[in-house]
Amino acid sequence: MLPRAAPDRFNATGATLQIGSGLLIEGQSSPLVYERAPVHVARTSIDHYQVYLPLHGGYQIETRRRTVTLKPGDIGIIDMIQPSRTHAGIPDSNGTHFLSLVVPRATLAPLLASPDSIHGMMIRGDTRHGAMLRETLLAARHESHTSGPFDGATAMQSAAALVAAGAGWSADAAQSAAQSLRQATLGTIMRYIEQHLDEPDLDADKICRHFPVSRATLYRFFEPHGGLIRHIQHRRLHRAFSMLISPEYRHLKLIDIAVDCNFASDATFVRAFRSNYGVTPGEVRAASVPMQRQEPDHDILQQIQSL
């Protein structure tokens, strides 16, 4: 590693998260050059691919076969058993902020048509697979920082499928590529919806602008889930349910929760909630409030939430 800034001005920070069989790394640094020389490669037993996603500041990856320049949002792939030279933080002299996914060869190579030929390859961020892969990595970072469940193995499988789709499927993997890619794409869109439930303009048009998919494809994805509109409403109702039973939101009126979850009125909210759960929001809140030193009726709440 060769810093391109003066020693007294150089800085670097990083955090690592295990995601399935691999690692997700988030880092920031001053401009630098990172070289994996042949002698360096020979000394290590790292048999992995590294997938780079610049969030701020560009990257230039040099290999024996190609040189690619990544702008924020593009994806670069390095085969870590081959020599490479990476310039981080160009052309922006302020440095770089990146996500990097380290994938075991055993996970990714079987999916690839040419496992030894993707070293230094770029998947552009404005392509379908690039956009989906970017959102998968961002969602994994986001979910790992929340208190909810995080399925790292599924996130890794989705990321590997999207890398293979962008770099070229193997003949064997191509037989199941459509299903794998469909699942990865649907999972990425669902995570995007989950993170934007508080936005009133969350609809098919917004999702299609964010992801390079057609409306027809988007609607087909959600047919098994009752349709896109139904799915968004169900997730907003689930959010409302969580707010109703949480002491943190007990000070809010029902109309406040309805508005926060993007329902037009409290009457619309109550009708949708009763249709989905079989009880009213008020009944759920009443069951969750301790009365006369009694604990909330968790059995009732769990039965309602499982509907």
Image (cartoon, rainbow, N blue to C red):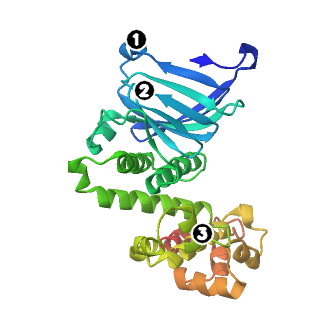
Q: Is residue 298 visible?
A: no
**Residue type at the position of mark 3:** Lys
Q: CA distance from mark 3 to mark 1?
A: 49 Å
Q: Quadrant of the N terminus?
A: top right
Which of the 4 quarters of the picture holds residue 274? bottom right
| Mark 1 lies on residue | 39
Query: Any mark on residue 2, and which?
Result: none
Residue 10 pos. (x, y %): 70, 20
> Which circle, 2 or 3, is nearer the viewer?
2
Which of the 4 quarters of the picture holds residue 98? top right
SS type, badge 3: helix
Q: Earlier in the sequence, mark 2 or mark 3?
A: 2
**Residue type at the position of mark 2:** Thr
Residue 198 pos. (x, y %): 67, 67
| Mark 2 lies on residue | 63
Identity of the residue furthest to the left in this view: 172
Disc 3 crowd, CA 10 A, few/some/many (<14, 14-19, 20+): few
| Mark 3 lies on residue | 206
Rendered position, 67 above or below 181 = above
Residue 240 pos. (x, y %): 64, 71
**Contact (Cβ within 8 Å) of mark 2 with mark 3:** no
> Which circle, 2 or 1, is nearer the viewer?
2
Q: Earlier in the sequence, mark 3 or mark 1?
A: 1
Q: CA distance from mark 2 to mark 1?
A: 15 Å
**Residue type at the position of mark 1:** Val
Q: Nearer the viewer, residue 144 or 283?
A: 144
